[in-house]
Image (cartoon, grey):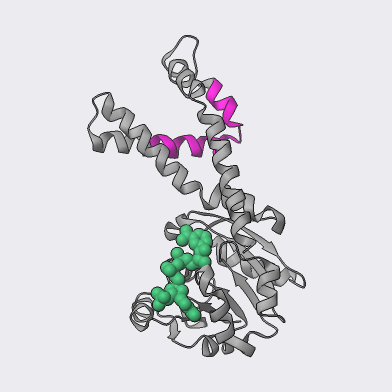
Amino acid sequence: MEYAFLGAGKMATAIIHGMVRAKVCAAGDIIAACPEPDLLESLRETTAIRVVTSNEEAAASAGIIVLCVKPADVEVALAQAGRALEGKLLVSIVAGVTIAQLRSLAPSTRVIRVMPNTAAMIARSATAYACGEGVSSGDKEVAEAVFSSIGEVYPVGEKLMNAVTGLSGSGPAYVYLLLEALSDGGVACGLSRKLALDLAVQTMLGAAEMVRETSEHPAVLREMVTSPAGTTMAGLSVLEAAGVRSAVIEAVRAAAERAEELSGK
Ligand SMILES: NC(=O)c1ccc[n+]([C@@H]2O[C@H](COP(=O)([O-])OP(=O)(O)OC[C@H]3O[C@@H](n4cnc5c(N)ncnc54)[C@H](OP(=O)(O)O)[C@@H]3O)[C@@H](O)[C@H]2O)c1
């Protein structure tokens, strides 16, 4: 079963690299299409996949179509692939475009809607996916195999896709902001910029790994490192007084609501 990527930008490149690295299939079983020949050529050179500028030609040669264009280009890209999409599995990573919208543009396809995040570029994505009508267990296995090659994969109902977008889709930006603030705090206390950022990054990674490896709730781990009248309590008191916890909750909610607004368009 061959894979055709419609769109060969940042996300398609990350997924193709992941698939080739993880040997999800042979590089020759992947074909990518986009309007930019230079982009295709560099992808071909680095991965040994096949490349074409025609969506129709790419789709015709594959059973699985992976849609990786920007939301504004979806209609044109699917129209260009045309009847070559019929009866195929359409896997879309396009933010905010629903399964119903995709099925109305490509009527006889089985659709899986996927939301990876930017860490796909280093194979550390948190990726959620939702299946449309008619998707088989074999189709799900295909999606799991493809997206496991760029990180962790979580099945969800489609109605939760906007919540996923608010959390893991937009989440990397929240974490970058927190990292920047942590390192600024270190600089304010006299650390060099480089050391402050290194310490902040390793602290964030270590804390996240602690949650994963111990399976403890973050509140339990936080309690464990907060001694009475100690330094951590002094810092946490400032965060709580500033409403950081509720601000983060509201950030996820606002991004999810914005995703809902955008998918209604
Ligand atoms: N970036 C993320 O972190 C992230 C996370 C989750 C989901 N997504 C979704 O992933 C999708 C792709 O994002 P990206 O960051 O990879 O964007 P990107 O780098 O701009 O890639 C889009 C690609 O689509 C190509 N394209 C445009 N029109 C086309 C057409 N008619 N047929 C085939 N290809 C066409 C573009 O070619 P040209 O350069 O020649 O225009 C480009 O190669 C978006 O829908 C986004 O919502 C992204």
Whether residue 147 sits left or right of residue 18 in the image: it is right
Q: Position of residue 232 (x, y in %)?
A: 44, 19
Q: Residue furthest top?
A: 229
Taking 262 as reference, is 106 above or below it?
below
- Residue 246: image x %, image y %? 57, 31
* Front position in the image: 180 or 260: 260
Quarter the C terminus occupies: bottom right
What residue is shown at x 34% (from left), y 77% (from top)?
42
Question: What residue do we see at 66% from left, 65% from top?
Answer: 98
With respect to residue 206, does 114 lie above or below? below
Q: Is residue 18 visible?
A: no
> Residue 149: where, in percent of width, then height?
52, 63
In which quadrant will I find the N terminus? bottom right
- Tell me if 249 is positioned left or right of 180 in this view: right
Question: How many discs appear?
Answer: 0
Left or right relative to 130: residue 5:
left
Residue 178 position by quadrant: top left
Quarter of the figure with residue 194: top left
Q: Residue at x 60, y 49 (%)?
A: 256
Drawn side of residue 140 relative to residue 226, left or right: right
Vertical relation: 97 (above or below) 50: above
What's the residue at 70%, 76% (across, down)?
A: 104
Q: Is residue 221 visible?
A: yes
Q: Position of residue 136 (x, y in %)?
A: 75, 71
Per the rendered image, the range of residues in magenta is 202-223
In which quadrant of the rendered view does residue 204 lie?
top left
